[in-house]
Amino acid sequence: MTVRGIAILGSTGSIGTTALTVLDRHRDRFRVAALTAFSNDALLAAQAARFEPGFVGLVGDAQKCGPGWSAGEGCLIEAATRDDVDIVLNAVVGSAGLGATMAALDSGKRVALANKESLVMAGDLVMEAARLGGGELVPVDSEHSAILQCLAGRPASEVRRLVLTASGGPFRDWDAGRLANATLADALRHPTWRMGRKISVDSATLANKALEVIEAHYLFGVPYDRIEVVVHPQSVVHSFVEFVDGSVLAQMGVPSMELPILYALTHPDRVADSGVPEFDPVALSPLTFEPVRRDAFPCLDLGIQAGRSGRAAPAVFNAANEQAVALFLGGTIRFADIARAVESALAQLGGLPGGTRDDILAADASARRHVQELY
Ligand code: NAD
Ligand code: MG
């Protein structure tokens, strides 16, 4: 069996550390060839000591680099394009991941994509890079992994609808009055998933689900009017595909990112994994479904509308959201201000051109500035 070299970008985060837990069980199949992180040098050093990658990069703090490490923003591209790397797991959070997604696809790598933001910002360019560079984009997001598994290679023309499940986040049943006073601690208390802070807030506003609808549109080539969202608080059904003949397939499993990460590395094959518990439908029941409260979570429709508008609108949505979430995490703005900031940025900048990488980066910068200036 060929052992495949993996670069993990963002190895110190929630997805990165989960990936290393999985890879530890599959050392016969995969070799960790490169690791990068932004700032957590102590954890990165421990990971490097355990997995002995040929490349270690610390993006944010050159002073804290260990011996032989690389520093600076270039680390991501360097790790993503190395000759000994076959698969790039992009687990960086936010638009900082775009360059590496593009570079890895340009050089013909498989990208196991957790960094959905890069696909949302520049969906057409990323899909084109995959086509032209001979690379391959495989989702890590659990919903998209589920859809990929249910599709099993069938074309978009056989799909009637994709239905993404959403846990509903920590505020699923909060009324408007309570939501207006939601604190940061409330927003970070996700009922079913343990994740990084940015995606946890995105799950509370449902901006994450909007990002995922756009992600699904690009990955699977399905138009927006055939992608729907349903709330499923138990996070056991990871998504559904309804085919044109009325058959509906769902992929299920305990809420854990270990399977979607491993599957992104082995797709279309499946490998035995001792780390995943046996599925117990009785213990996991009941499984319930309910409509999204769209008025309570305006980020969902703002994002889907941005996706439909095209051009730079998805990049503006993404950047405004990132900037607003950063302000919320820093205690500068309130929970409801996130949606207000995103709406304002889209109203002002949603029509910007998005045909080139420079257009996208300019729109991203303008949207961040716009939100910064609101507060
Ligand atoms: P996290 O905050 O836990 O980790 C982010 C990682 O990115 C860290 O290693 C950090 O050092 C690195 N990083 C941050 N800023 C960087 C920069 N400017 N340049 C280079 N590296 C940088 O986040 P996470 O929860 O692991 O999420 C990572 C990505 O995966 C996000 O795009 C998220 O939407 C997606 N995702 C996460 C989950 C989950 O369960 N956590 C599920 C699906 C998708
Ligand atoms: Mg998801």
Image (spheres, rainbow, N blue to C red):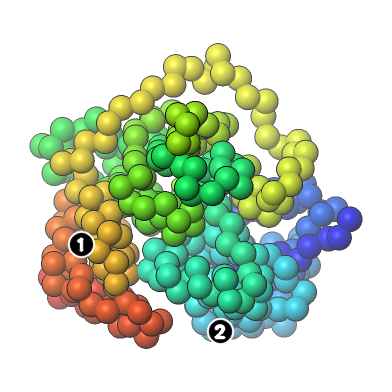
Image quadrant in which the C terminus is located: bottom left
Counting residues from the start of the chain, the first of labels 1 and 2 encountered is 2
The residue carrying mark 2 is 74
**Helix, strand or loop for disc 2:** helix
Residue farthest to the right? 1
User: What x and y, as percent, mark residue 296?
Assistant: 18, 41
Tell me the kind of residue under disc 2. Gly
Would residue 185 be visible to someone looking at this image? no
**Helix, strand or loop for disc 1:** helix
Tell me the kind of residue under disc 1. Val
Which mark is drawn over residue 342?
1
Q: Please tell me in which quadrant of the rendered image residue 149 appears.
A: top right
Q: Please tell me in which quadrant of the rendered image residue 103 appears.
A: bottom right
Q: Please tell me in which quadrant of the rendered image residue 254 appears.
A: top right
As measured in the structure, the alpha-carbon distance from the residue carrying label 1 to the one carrying label 2 is 30 Å
Disc 2 residue lies near ligand 1 with CB under 8 A = no
**Looking at the image, residue 253 lies above or below residue 98:** above
